[in-house]
Amino acid sequence: EYTPLQSLNLSTGKKDIITYFQSLPYEDKKNPMATLAISIRADNIESLLSRINVLNRGIIYIIDSNNQIIMSVGDKRMFTPIQYDDLSPEKDYIYSHIDGEKVVTTYVSSSINDWKYVSIVPDAVFMNDVRYIKNLIVAVIALELLIGLMLAFYLARNNYIPIKRLVDKLK
């Protein structure tokens, strides 16, 4: 279990935290002997997630099996409420539109708890590297084709010159 993002007033100032609770022993949840509470500072999670380049135009959020948003980082305009059960394991991504812009929703399920980590980014950002690689491949193939044609012309010409001289001598 956990508590969603909440603010605490500490001596060092106001901090946003998520508290995670785990019954102990882990194997016997019906008869817990103790409960371990772990407070996770939201700014630590945000700093980890902010290293992902898509955050300048997308959003990442964590959702639990009760459809509660645990926390989110990024462009709040990109947020689209998605039901936990709509994020099925059969699909790795979902295409949709937000304010007329095509977006890609990708997600990963946690193997430890009932959380899903959801990322929503514009299709242009999502496919940017794919388009770069595609254009690079097309350019390399075009260059190879041009070099191949020039080499074929050069070799054909060099092989034709002795034959042309022989034909000219026979005339």
Image (cartoon, rainbow, N blue to C red):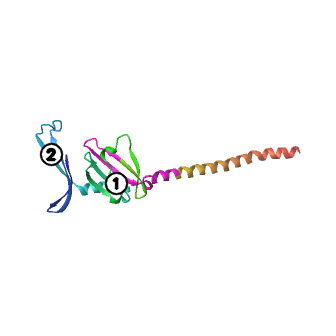
Q: What element carries label 2?
A: strand
Which contiguous range is marked in magenta?
107-134
Q: Which of 106 and 25 is in front in this view?
A: 106
| Image label count | 2
Neighbourhood count class around disc 1 (C-alpha, 10 Å): few under 14, some 14–19, many 20 upward:
few
Quadrant, the N terminus: top left
* Distance between the alpha carbons at the discs numbered 1 and 2: 33 Å
Residue position marked by numbered label 1 in the rendering: 80
Please state the horizontal and vertical placement of residue 37, each as a whole percent of the image.
15, 48
Residue placed under numbered mark 2 in the picture? 36
- Give the camera-side residue of 39 and 123: 123
- Label for residue 131? none
Amino acid carrying label 1: it is Thr
Vertically, is 13 above or below 61? below
- Asked whether residue 2 is drawn in magenta, I would say no
Residue 113 vertical placement versus 124 (above, below): above
| CA neighbours of label 2 inside 10 A, class few (<14), some (14 to 19), many (20+) | few
Task: Provide the secondary structure element on which disc 1 rests.
Answer: loop
Asked if the stretch drawn in magenta spans residue 131, the answer is yes
Residue in the picture at 84% in, 44% down: 167
- Is tag 1's residue or tag 2's residue first in the polypeptide sequence? 2
Relative to residue 1, is residue 110 drawn left or right?
Answer: right
Q: Which residue is drawn at 10% across and 39% down?
A: 33
**Residues at marks 1 and 2 touching, judged by CB atoms closer than 8 Å:** no
26 in relation to 61, above or below: above
Where's residue 138, x and y in %?
Answer: 56, 50
The residue shown at (15%, 45%) is 36
Location of residue 50 by image quarter: bottom left
